[in-house]
Image: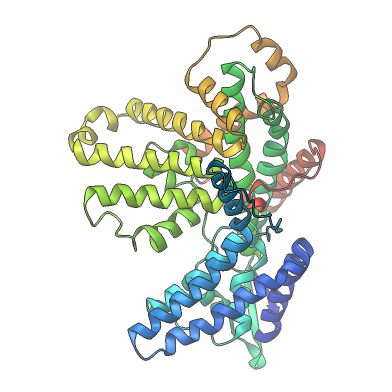
Amino acid sequence: MTIIIIKHRRFQHIFLLGASYFFFYYTSNYLITLLIFTTIWDFYFGKMIFNAKTSKQKKICLIISLAGNLGLLGYFKYVDFAIVQFNIFGQYFDLGYNIPLLHLALPIAISFYTFHSITYTVSIYRNQIMPTKTLTEYAIFVAFFPQLVAGPILRAKEFLPQLRDKITAGKDSLKMIIIDNSNLKFGVTMMIFGFLKKMFFSDNISPFVNSIFENPIGADSFSIILATIGFGVQIYCDFSGYSDIAIGAALILGFRIPINFNKPYFASSPSDFWRRWHISLSSWLRDYLYIPLGGNKKSHLRTYVNLGTVMFLGGLWHGASWNFIIWGLLHGGYLVIHRFVKDKFPAISKIEFFESKIGKVISIIIMQYFVFLAWIPFRIHDFNYMIYSMQKYVFFDFEISGIGHLISINKFPIGLIGIFFILQIIVFLKPELLKRVSELELKKWTIFLITAMSMLILFYVGPEDFIYFKF
């Protein structure tokens, strides 16, 4: 069964663009001008790259385009951070002058739509796509509202063809969009699961995590470890929840955007983790940064430097703060060590134990120990609090006298953490669960929706911003 909505192509595009701009203006007000500037800038530079007569001209146009994008991102996101570091440096050398901060507002979603736009000009430069015929088409790609503020990061060569493919010639020479009913059910189901992750799990675990990490000094190892695990669950449910909502909303509109998570807490190695976590970002960094730097095609040392550089910039992408840089460097260190062991001791990966079930389980547990360790600097900005928490995480103090009290006053969030991991195991063993729910007959599917919505209402704790809105 299909739902047929007859519309002219131009009206469909204007409707999508208008909805996207309204959504962005509602959240960002006048900062929508930056989004519009980025759109116009790369739309015309895309044409200039395509029409350039020589490879040198194409490269110059691409460099100017990238400079405009990254310059805008750098100015609004990193200039105050750079001023603070310069002032600290100046005090150290007694320069006697501090540069005043600009106190710039961070434009919401600038990290995401900048990366969207870069894929367009780079893809034209690489002869992977042709420029869009209209500015409206390109503007929809940059500002597509379901995933605009927190991803997944779109690629021009994957999204732009859908703007044309979803509309086909119909009766009376009109254009029509055909939305498959199964896509509608699957999209709504994904959105409901996304809201459950965000509003039921993440938002209810957040107060417990905050109670520990707002001032962790004096907390015992058990409290720190439990709060760290809680934050790992919180950020996963928060971010993957938004991604599910975005993917589901896009699917309802007839568009497919890439998945962003694939059971990351079952990763058995650092590289495996980044194939599962924030997939649209990690693959973007691989294709537009790691490979152009040389990837693993150069020497071993060059590969290690490339891995470290990419993860450093990946951490910095998340925010202008040292805690994100430390988080990125930690993951860079994990990737370098893993790669070094593979290069120097290739026989280790061929040991049968690591291919057995128990070997894989142990690999997953060890990997997640380090993944959750890295969540501490991601969550805590204060350097002293960060160091204290990481010490307590690594060097267990065996202080257990307060465990009972901690659990008694946080029964619900701690219970949710346990339920989360049980559900993750079920989903890992039955990966088609989401699809099966969407394929339920209408009566049972409606019962599922009513039950899920009732849970959202009963356990609603108030409006909480998505964590990645800050990036």
The spot of residue 386 in percent (x, y) is 57, 30
Left or right of residue 423, residue 353 in this image: left
On screen, 186 above or below 59? above
The residue positioned 50% from the left and 44% from the top of the image is 325
The image quadrant that residue 38 belongs to is bottom right
Residue lying furthest top: 401
The image quadrant that residue 329 belongs to is top left
Q: How is the image coloured?
A: rainbow
The spot of residue 155 in percent (x, y) is 50, 67
Left or right of residue 357, residue 245 in this image: right
On screen, 202 above or below 352? below
Left or right of residue 419, residue 278 in this image: left
The residue positioned 29% from the left and 59% from the top of the image is 294
The image quadrant that residue 169 belongs to is bottom right
The spot of residue 410 in percent (x, y) is 72, 21
On screen, 139 above or below 206? below
Quarter of the rendering occupied by the N terminus: bottom right
Q: How many marks?
A: 0
The residue positioned 76% from the left and 67% from the top of the image is 25
Is residue 191 at least partly visible in the picture? yes
Of 15 and 178, nearer the camera is 15
Of 417 and 93, nearer the camera is 93
On screen, 14 above or below 28? below
The residue positioned 52% from the left and 26% from the top of the image is 390
The spot of residue 261 in percent (x, y) is 51, 48
Is residue 319 at least partly visible in the picture? no
